[in-house]
Amino acid sequence: MKGKRIIGVLGDVGGKNAALPPLELALNAGCDVLLLLAGTCRTLHRGGKLAFDPRFLVHEVGSAPAEYAHLRQPHHLVVLGASQSVEGSTVAAGVAILAQAPVVAIQDMYGSSVPTLKVLQREGCLGRIACVCVTDEFSRQHLLSQGLEIFQDRVPVTGGPQFDKVIEIQKTWAPRRARIRGTLAPHDLLVLIAGQLNGTTEMLALVDAASLKLGLPNNLHVVLRRHPRSTELDQWLTNACLGRTGPRLRFYDVPQEYAPTNEDLLPGVDIVMSGYSTTNLYGVLYEIPGVVYVGTPSFRWDLWREKRLEKPPEVKAGAAWYVETSGELVHVITELQRGDASTDVSRLKEAQRRIAQHNDGHATDRVWAQMRNLLA
């Protein structure tokens, strides 16, 4: 593979996490890899919060085609990290159209490549995509159901490269948990709120109300991580909510070097809450019984708008809780405190095991095999 030239387009953080591992294998095989950073990845890189292997050539681009048109020099392969932002999907589609090379798209979770594919569909350029690598069979069927039946034979189920690390992290779970929890008592509950574009304040309000109903203000601790693309309204509402609930909720600070990402926090938490974040899917793969999806109005609307789904598939599979009210969250916490004595918890853990067993730690190899076939 020495001398082969590859362009990788990275917009959203989730898409970056899925695309980077096979691109690193390409580097190891002697390929020259140019990374084009758009959207959130560009912002984080510009702010010094995103670093890459120095062997990558890194270039920041905006959504205007003129910013990457000069990169039309011959390449052998284009790899598109999934992006659900307008800018990220626009750049990914634009590069795919300009490139004189096969294009591989890599989904990090169900539906995340659809915005890019829809742009290509509108431009009459879906034929530029050689294959779309997806995490599981549900993701494959979901993609085909979005008016993209043309890809019937071009959607291999490879698994998610970003999930390969789950196997290794599980081997060091206990020391990671101890480091993250610090001085917390064994009976203390640590709740991770993984914010999304909207709805962060709704999660805070649910946790605050449930804590008061259970009489847990001193034993329930919250780690709040906001989404890098949260809307201005979500940020404003969250700040206002913190002004009301802050004096009651006990917020817990985890040093950034211990847990730079939401996923790094998971070994230490008892409950992880989000609307439909990849963080929750990591929680399912780690078989954490306290994975909670929130079905308040903001999340239901965003999930339908982005994925055309009414509920996350992990919920339908019985591998996660689903709450809309503080009373339902009280039930979840109560059952979690009962542990294996709870029938609900036992059923949920069994469903998680069924899903986790398909994550064998070799998704990166399978995606790289797809890339190699196109580079041959």
Image (spheres, helix red, strand yellow):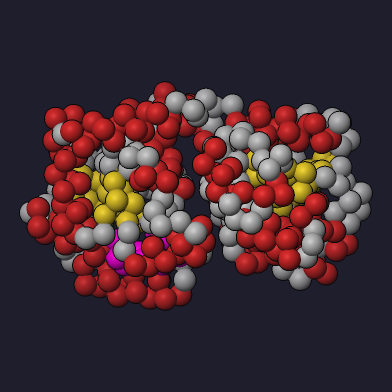
Quick one: 224 or 254, which is closer to the camera? 224
Give the quarter of the image for residue 249.
bottom left
Is residue 196 one of those drawn in magenta? yes
Is residue 188 one of those drawn in magenta? no
Residue at the location (43% across, 30% down)? 356
Residue at the location (70% across, 46% down)? 151
Residue 2 located left or right of residue 205 = right
In the rendered view, tell whether residue 41 sits above or below residue 33: below
Q: Is residue 227 visible?
A: no
Counting from the top left corner in percent of width and height, residue 299 is at 38, 62
Q: What segment carries the magenta color? A: 193-203
Give the quarter of the image for residue 342.
top left
Which residue is the extreme one toward the right? 74
* Quarter containing the C terminus: top right
Quick one: 115 or 253, which is closer to the camera? 115
Residue 351 located left or right of residue 362 = left
* Quarter containing the N terminus: top right
Counting from the top left corner in percent of width and height, residue 73 is at 91, 53
Counting from the top left corner in percent of width and height, residue 173 is at 37, 29
Residue 272 located left or right of residue 77 = left
Residue at the location (60% across, 55% down)? 146
Quick one: 212 or 311, which is closer to the camera? 311
Q: Is residue 373 visible?
A: yes
Quick one: 315 or 228, which is closer to the camera? 315
Counting from the top left corner in percent of width and height, residue 226 is at 41, 60
In the rendered view, tell whether residue 212 sits above or below residue 312: below
How many numbered marks have been drawn onto this rendered protein structure? 0
In the rendered view, tell whether residue 328 sits above or below residue 259: below
Residue at the location (68% across, 56% down)? 117
